[in-house]
Amino acid sequence: MAVYTDITEDDLSAFLEAYDVGQLTSYKGIAEGVENSNFLLHTTKGAYILTLYEKRVNAGDLPFFLGLMHHLADRGLSCPLPLPRADGELLGELSGRPAAVISFLEGMWLRKPEAKHCREVGKALAEMHLAGQGFDLKRPNALSVGGWRPLWVNSEARADEVQTGLKDEISAELAHLENHWPKTLPDGVIHADLFPDNVFFLGDQLSGLIDFYFACNDYLAYDVAVCLNSWCFEKNGSYNITKGMALLSGYESVRKLTAGEVEALPLLCRGSALRFFLTRLYDWLMTPAGALVVKKDPLEYLTKIRFHRAIVSSAEYGLRIEGASA
């Protein structure tokens, strides 16, 4: 469920008077996403997305998110664009929440992506990394290695309720990653959450990237690791090397991974898997019964952590090692 704040037609119509979008004809909530309240609007000038930013989103981060979308779009990346108000601002307020009107992106996300789609995702991710160069605002990744222990502290005592032995296993995993996390890799703006539901396709053609509300500055190869975890595993937990090879070759067709990134990729994949395991575990344990939130199974990412732990070389992900540059 992704409508946490309700809105009335009168309030919405008054809110839209500050935008050059015509008259409201209809609106409905969008029941996907977890962070914000989203609505599909239809007006006399077209279709738009209305986003109300909920309390879990730091209002101080909104200029980064909205400015980044403009920066990327100006450099040719297909992504939604925040519309300016009559006063030039990108943010207004509706129902007590910061709110923005976003351009509508045609397409739909794929429930069963194939290798050809993974290649397009890898290519688009690299294009985003290059397009992000020169963006002046900075936002640290609060959900990188420095943010994992606070998450774990809040769940550690109850971890064995989910699976016996989980407390000891994750404690050891976290300590290993903290002690071995890379110190110097190419960095820049990353999406940090490029799951299949954040990539739109028209047929087999990628039409754009959406949902930049976890975007931040971090290692570029960490973003690749997030995508390997979210696009290249099957529902039974097995890694699909054909998809992995496609995603990585698509990425490297635009931006070559450095030798350091190639070496660090297994560790980055472990870290990415732990990040999503920990946020899922926290929600699994802490979300009250009956809440209108779909809890995601953390054990899906425990399986991925264990897979990555056994990886010896990035070639096992389908990466052509000889393609790396120094």
Image: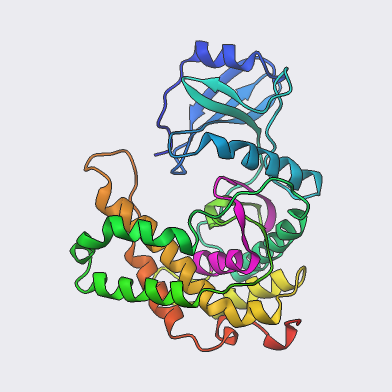
The colour scheme of the drawn protein is rainbow
Task: Decide if residue 36 is in sight here.
Answer: yes
Q: Which residue occupies the extreme right position in the image?
A: 75
Residue 210 coordinates in the image, percent (x, y):
61, 47
What residue span does the magenta drawing correspond to? 204-231
103 on left or right of 54: right
Q: Quadrant of residue 159?
A: bottom left
Residue 222 coordinates in the image, percent (x, y):
58, 67
Q: Is residue 221 magenta?
A: yes
Pick the residue in front: 314 or 31: 314
Q: Quadrant of the C terminus?
A: bottom right
Pick the residue in front: 2 or 190: 190
Task: Decide if residue 318 is in sight here.
Answer: no
Q: Is residue 7 above or below residue 182?
A: above
Residue shown at 69%/82% (left/top)? 259
Residue shown at 56%/81% (left/top)? 317
Q: Is residue 200 magenta?
A: no
Pick the residue in front: 259 or 162: 259
Numbered-mark total: 0
Q: Is residue 286 above or below residue 259?
A: above
Residue shown at 65%/29% (left/top)? 47
198 on left or right of 189: left
Q: Quadrant of the N terminus?
A: top left
Residue 56 coordinates in the image, percent (x, y):
43, 39
Q: Is residue 170 above or below residue 192?
A: below
